[in-house]
Amino acid sequence: MIWKPNVTVAAVISKDDRYLLVEEQTINGLLFNQPAGHLEPNESILQGVIRETLEETGYTFTPQWLLGIYRWHSPVNDTTYLRFTFLGTAICHDHNRKLDKGIVRAAWFHTNEIYELAHRHRSPMVIKCIEDHLAGKRYPLELLTYYD
């Protein structure tokens, strides 16, 4: 049997010293995460992060940098995630858009608020991605290649 991780995409979006997070209903209660989700068949990694951000926040996301690629094994569901996380800007917020099932809200949080909510993060990747952004990590999108 060949082991395969779950491939996910996420967006780290900052504006005025705040970060856009989603609060979502999970099997472990209400938790916080960056706009994120699973990559769908026949979509590029960039298409995936743009779609997930729109579906979970109502914002149109423009990826500008690859922040990093993160691997995390969840002991709760015995699943390994391979997460491609992007930095970019959120524009054109659609206030009338219905958010994905399970998403309670999308909101902007200061870094100190995010640390205070650490016990309610969906994974350790939430704070790690913010710390990597604050450390200035970023890589060109040209690192990614997509073939039809």
Image (cartoon, grey):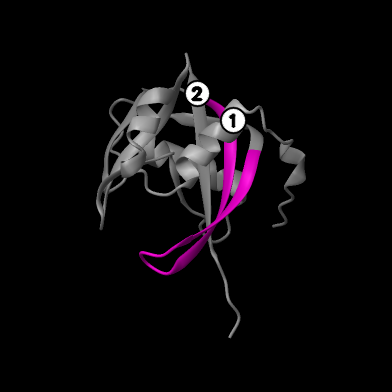
- In reply to whether residue 130 is colored magenta, the answer given is no
Q: CA distance from mark 2 to mark 1?
A: 9 Å
Q: Classify residue 80 as left or right of residue 133.
A: left
Q: Residue at x 52, y 33 (%)?
A: 130
Q: Nearer the viewer, residue 135 or 20?
A: 135
Amino acid type for the residue under numbered disc 2: Ser
Amino acid type for the residue under numbered disc 1: His
Q: Position of residue 71 (x, y in %)?
A: 57, 56
Q: Nearer the viewer, residue 78 or 51?
A: 78
Query: On the image, numbered disc 1 is attached to which residue?
Result: 133
The image quadrant that residue 59 belongs to is top left
Q: Residue at x 50, y 28 (%)?
A: 13
Q: Classify residue 26 as left or right of residue 86.
A: left
Query: On the image, numbered disc 2 is attached to which residue?
Result: 14
Task: Please tell me how many numbered marks the rendered image carries.
Answer: 2
Q: Position of residue 40 (x, y in %)?
A: 51, 57
Which quarter of the image is occupied by the C terminus? Answer: bottom right
